[in-house]
Structure formats: C-alpha cells, structure tokens
Image (cartoon, rainbow, N blue to C red):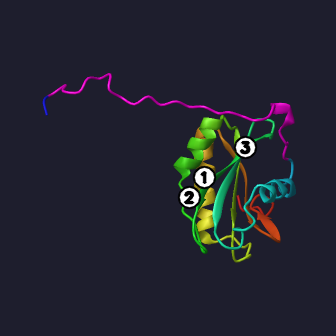
Amino acid sequence: MKKNEFPLSRVAEIKVSYLPHFKASERPKLTSSQQVYTILLDNWDLGLIELQEQFKIILLNQRCRVLGICEVSRGGITGTIVDAKIIFGIALKAGACAIILAHNHPSGNLKPSKSDLQLTEKIWQGGKLLDISVYDHLIISADGFLSFAKENLM
C-alpha cells in the first residue's frame, strides 16, 4: 500500500440523536427508590425476571425527570456482562445528567455479589469523570428490591 493511497475524505460520519416521546414536563420525576422500582417493574419483561438476568439504566435530566430506560445487557440465569463504555455512551447520547443502574437476580436473592459492588464502584467513578451522577443501583426481583444507596453501598 502506497502512502496516502486512501483519501482523507473516506471516513465514516457519526451522528448522535435523541428522540423523546414526551415533553419534559410530562416525564416522571423520581424522588425515591420505591418509585424507581415501580417504573422498572412497569418496563421490565416480567416473563424473564425470574429466568434471565438483565441490566438496565434509567437516564435522568438535571431535575430527576426520566429521559428513558435502556437495556444495556442480557445474560443467562446467573449473570450478565456489563460494559461501562456502553452505559456512558448511552448516557452521553441522551444528554443525561444522572443515571440509575438496575439489574435483576433471577434467583430472587437481593443480596449484591462482590462483582455487583465492584461494577457499581467502577461506574460511579466513571460518572464522576464525566459529570454524570450515579444516584443508585437497584437489584430487583418480582417480589422486591434492594437499593444500594438506601443500604449505604455506594
């Protein structure tokens, strides 16, 4: 290949867009972990909650109003792989000022694993660098939830 064989104009264009379906004033405002759990259950595939682990994020504006919910990963019965780059890519694309992390434990056990705690810390630290607050991480089941913030785990 010769030097400068490919013209500099041959690069991919990257576009960023966010298409909200509601006015900002119509978006729910979250003020408690119970509200977060309710919104998550309303937007979770309840047919999978006891079968397959899923990881989602709730994106929030500066007034704690929900911009949207996005599934970040889906795994097996005992775990799922979560990539922080994907989480922050979504948050930046949506213009989120804050996020709430959430995943289910198909077993129904709400106790966080060591890897749950490590991932939460990693994402919290990444959020500090990007000025995106990580308000909470919920582990949910069909019967209840555990809030990392409420349990002082973050």
Q: Position of residue 55 (x, y in %)?
A: 64, 59
C-alpha gap between disc 1 and disc 2: 10 Å
Contact (CB < 8 A) between labels 2 and 3? Answer: no
> Mark 2 or 3, which is nearer the eye?
3
Q: Secondary structure at mark 2?
A: loop
- First reached walking from the N terminus: tag 2 or tag 3: 3
Q: Position of residue 134 (x, y in %)?
A: 69, 48
Query: Furthest residue to the left?
Result: 2
- Callout 3: 10 Å neighbours few (<14), some, many (20+)? some
Give the numbered dot on residue 68: 3
Image point (80%, 60%), residue name: 41
Q: In the rendered image, which quarter is residue 46 located in?
A: bottom right
Q: Secondary structure at mark 3?
A: strand
User: Which residue occupies the foreground of this view, 52 or 148?
Assistant: 52
Tell me which amino acid carries mark 2: Val
Q: Is residue 48 left or right of residue 15?
A: right
Depicted 28 relative to depicted 153: above or below: above
- Callout 2: 10 Å neighbours few (<14), some, many (20+)? some
Magenta span of residues: 3-30
Q: Which residue is mark 1?
A: 123
Image point (53%, 54%), residue name: 83
Give the numbered dot on residue 82: 2
Tell me which amino acid carries mark 1: Ile
Q: In the rendered image, which quarter is residue 106 located in?
A: bottom right
Image point (83%, 56%), residue name: 33
> Mark 1 or 2, which is nearer the eye?
2
Q: Position of residue 73 (x, y in %)?
A: 58, 58
